[in-house]
Image (cartoon, rainbow, N blue to C red):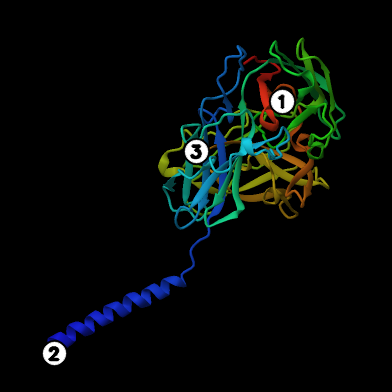
Amino acid sequence: MNKRITIKILILLLVLSFSLKAEEDKFIPSIEPLLCGVRIYGDNETMPPILVLNNSSGYSTNIGSEKITVELDIFADVPPNLYARFVHCTADWKETGNIFYQELYHRRFSNIRWDVAGYTNPYFSHRGYFTFPDFNIPIKYSGNWKVKFYNYDDDKEEFAEAKFFVVEPRAQTAMSIWNSMYSTKYNVSSTSYNLDVQVWSKLNLLDNNVHTCVLYKNNRWEEPLVISDRSNIDDYSYLYKYHYRRSVSGFIGARKFFRIEGVPAENEYRVLDLTNLGYFPRGVAEQRLPLSDLRRNGTFNEYDNEGMMITNRVPNYANDYIYLEFLLEPDGVITNEDVFIIGTFNNWKPDFRWIMHFDEADRYYKLRAWVRRGVHNYLYATGEFDFYRNRAVRYSTDQYEGNTSVNDHSFIAFVYYKDVAFGGYDAIIAATRQSISRSY
């Protein structure tokens, strides 16, 4: 009898302990997923996120991929329950208000593969990624697209987004680039570029519907150079310190010309190589650049990676983030503007986290940030911070980087056509890539 009572007491204590543990777990806060970084690229990480659709028009493009990969870095206790939506946009990145192209239900995707970070890091814990298009994610229409991520538990707030382009060649295009001059505000070279994009087609396209050409420099998708004959297209002039001259002329049946003049040549991007574990060991301690960056007047030591992040030399066990302090030696030139860092680590879109502060004691501009291990390209820019847009505006890079046409930066041009099918959308009918000294 005593033995039975003892067993019952043990069972009761065990049940009670589990109940208490369950109640205790209710009060253990789970880590809300935090976004560390987003990256999107084509067939490999050196290719821009440009997808080319097959067609029978006979026209082609010299840039593009068959697949696109999206990477999403987060910090959380477990991978979040996210899904992706694919959203079609206009030439100036407004979401297309047309249900035929959005197909909300059919364009949800949650088959995201998650890898755990190979090393304990207080900033980064999981990397999610997937590649498309495939059977689950068919892309049927050309134009500007966004991949937008949401949480299934709270899908009212966007978690992250990435931009990509889809081209269906229905016209041929060519780009010409030549040197010109601009009125710089600083004591640097006044070399600029004039860019002329020509497009022509023998297909039955409406000339008035070939309305816009947008150029991007070196994978900097947040800095569009818009040339359009439509007044309702946002030309993003508020981003730039200098004003560019633009014009549209000609006819699509012969040749239509989109021209922009006076774009500063800029300098070669600075290169930051974080792949050496001896210089940048794993860990959580703050690490400085080996030497402070110096103000440049157009000179540079090495060529860049066309504005792309390169991680293929990083072993899996070291694929982490580094807490890095940037140091800029202004050489006595202290600006009354905000100083930003723009580069591959922030997708060339500086927000409030990338504003530097000037240290009066050391006479350096400084910034501390978590940066993914890899080879990065970046520049120092001066301008203003727009709190409403949460980004730098009216900025340029010539004050601390100088300006030189010796760099070999390429430009990518997209030509937009207002397709009237199913209510109308902005299709990309031609694309090309060109630099001032190279043909692609």
Q: Quadrant of the C terminus?
A: top right
The amino acid type, in three-letter code, at marker 2 is Asn
Report which residue position mark 2 lands on. Answer: 2
Say if residue 344 shows up in the picture: no
Report which residue position mark 3 lands on.
275
Q: Give the secondary structure at mark 1.
A: strand
Q: Which mark is residue 150?
A: none
Question: Which residue was labeled with disc 1?
Answer: 416
Seen from the viewer's position, the closer of residues 265 and 160 is: 160
- Quarter holding the N terminus? bottom left
Label 3 or label 2, whichever comes before in sequence order: 2
Name the spot of residue 355 as percent of width and height, x first: 71, 49
Crowd around label 1: few <14 · some 14–19 · many ≥20 (10 Å): many
Horizontal side of 245 relative to 12 (left or right) equals right
Callout 3 secondary element:
loop
Pointers 3 and 2 in contact (CB under 8 A)? no
Q: Nearer the viewer, mark 1 or mark 2?
A: 1
Residues at discs 1 and 2 in contact (Cβ within 8 Å): no
User: What residue do we see at 35% from left, 76% from top?
Assistant: 19
- The amino acid marked with disc number 3 is Thr
Residue count near mark 3 (Cα–Cα under 10 Å), binned few <14, some 14–19, many ≥20: many
